Image (spheres, helix red, strand yellow):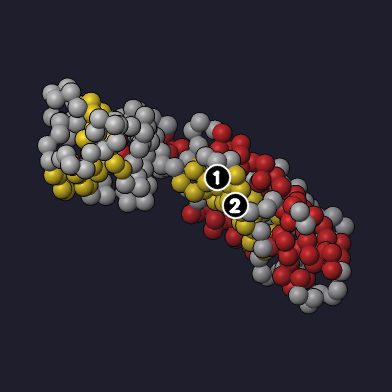
């Protein structure tokens, strides 16, 4: 099996079956001899191993010539390297001796191991870690090129600077066609309604508020459809995908000002839809295929 997938091992020297125990990252930390009934026998020896964050053995109790250990990977007894399927890993340096075969899709550091965070992450095949990915939707005022100095423009730029494998971002704003076009395709949230030059007067009160809210809701629906698709990708970095909406302060398209009535009364229904949009946060679990909360359509319909 993969990380944490080994069920038992029979040792050739004594012909006995032993069952492994794991920590949260799938490292084998103990072996227990199995009794005749198939369960661990507490009266027989226990074999225990502890590792540091990068796979070096720091505690070893008992004797067992098993090649399986850190991340449930086969460890070469002569070199100390662990085999992950696509490349070998060196726990002494905490790095891969060879380049990442999928290139920068696994991160810009082609030799780095789980972003130097072996406590919280595991690498299954020597390609990339599985992590919680972020889909971020920025809703607010956007500036027209060549100015590009609106809240939406600046926020998207800041998200991109910190984006990692599997993250996506998109803007819902005036001129968002220009903003989203500049986002690399693998980081861009697709199918966001485009308002390249705005419609009518760019700041036309009720029309602007309604249009921005409805475009934002459609953007969330597009992100909800994209999350399962990204999870199905065999090269995905994501174990979960969290969708968050950030209604940005500043500029005339400040949704929060409209929601608090600072620009007039736009009706209870529109305010309700705006609050559902700005408060939206939901996480899709790639393994279970389930969402942590209600989809935006369910929230708006009261289901």
Q: Residue at 62%, 57% (x, y): give it.
A: 281
The CA distance from mark 2 to mark 1 is 8 Å
* Left or right: where 5 falls relative to 147: left
Q: Which mark is on residue 285?
A: 1
- Label 2: how many Cα within 10 Å (few below 14, some 14–19, many 20+): few
Q: Quadrant of the N terminus?
A: top left
Q: Which residue lies furthest to the front in this view?
A: 37
Please name whichever residue, 98 or 280, is drawn nearer the observer in this view of the structure: 280
Q: In which quarter of the image is residue 55?
A: top left
Position of residue 63 measured from the top left corner of the image (x, y, whole percent): 12, 37
Above or below for 223 versus 149? above
Position of residue 17 measured from the top left corner of the image (x, y, whole percent): 23, 29
Camera sees residue 37 = yes
- Secondary structure beneath disc 2? loop
Q: Which mark is on residue 292?
A: 2
Q: In which quarter of the image is residue 288?
A: top right
Please name whichever residue, 182 or 261, is drawn nearer the observer in this view of the structure: 261
Q: Quadrant of residue 31?
A: top left
Camera sees residue 167 = no
Position of residue 209 measured from the top left corner of the image (x, y, whole percent): 81, 63
- Label 1: how many Cα within 10 Å (few below 14, some 14–19, many 20+): some
Q: Quadrant of the C terminus?
A: bottom right
Q: Residue at 66%, 46% (x, y): give it.
A: 223
Please name whichever residue, 6 or 133, is drawn nearer the observer in this view of the structure: 6
Q: Which of marks 2 and 1 is nearer the N terminus?
A: 1
Q: Residue at 66%, 45% (x, y): give it.
A: 224
CB contact under 8 Å: marks 2 and 1: yes
Position of residue 146 measured from the top left corner of the image (x, y, whole percent): 67, 55
């Amino acid at each position: 099996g993969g990380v944490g997938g080994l069920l038992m091992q029979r040792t050739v020297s004594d012909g006995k079956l032993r069952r492994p125990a794991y920590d949260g990252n799938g490292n084998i930390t103990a072996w227990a001899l199995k009794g005749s009934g198939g369960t661990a026998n507490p009266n027989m020896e226990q074999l225990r191993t502890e590792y540091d964050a990068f796979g070096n053995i720091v505690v070893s109790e008992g004797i067992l010539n098993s090649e399986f250990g850190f991340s449930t990977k086969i460890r070469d007894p002569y070199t100390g390297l662990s085999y992950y399927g696509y490349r070998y890993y060196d726990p002494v340096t905490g790095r891969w001796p060879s380049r990442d075969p999928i290139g920068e899709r696994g991160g810009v550091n082609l030799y780095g191991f789980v972003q130097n965070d072996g406590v919280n992450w595991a690498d299954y095949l020597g390609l990339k870690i599985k992590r919680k990915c972020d889909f971020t939707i920025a809703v607010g005022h956007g500036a027209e090129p060549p100015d590009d100095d609106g809240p939406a423009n600046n926020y998207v730029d800041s998200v991109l600077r910190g984006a990692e494998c599997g993250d996506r971002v998109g803007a819902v704003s005036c001129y968002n066609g220009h903003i989203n076009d500049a986002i690399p395709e693998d980081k861009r949230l697709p199918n966001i309604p485009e308002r390249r030059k705005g419609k009518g007067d760019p700041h036309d009160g009720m029309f602007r508020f309604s249009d921005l809210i409805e475009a934002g809701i459609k953007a969330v629906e597009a992100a909800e459809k994209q999350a399962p698709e990204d999870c199905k990708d065999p090269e995905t970095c994501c174990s979960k995908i969290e969708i968050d909406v950030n209604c940005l302060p500043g500029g005339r398209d400040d949704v929060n000002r409209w929601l608090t009535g600072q620009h007039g009364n736009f009706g209870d229904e529109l305010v309700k839809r705006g609050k559902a949009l700005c408060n939206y946060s939901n996480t899709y679990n790639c393994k279970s295929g389930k969402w942590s909360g209600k989809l935006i359509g369910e929230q708006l319909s009261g289901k």
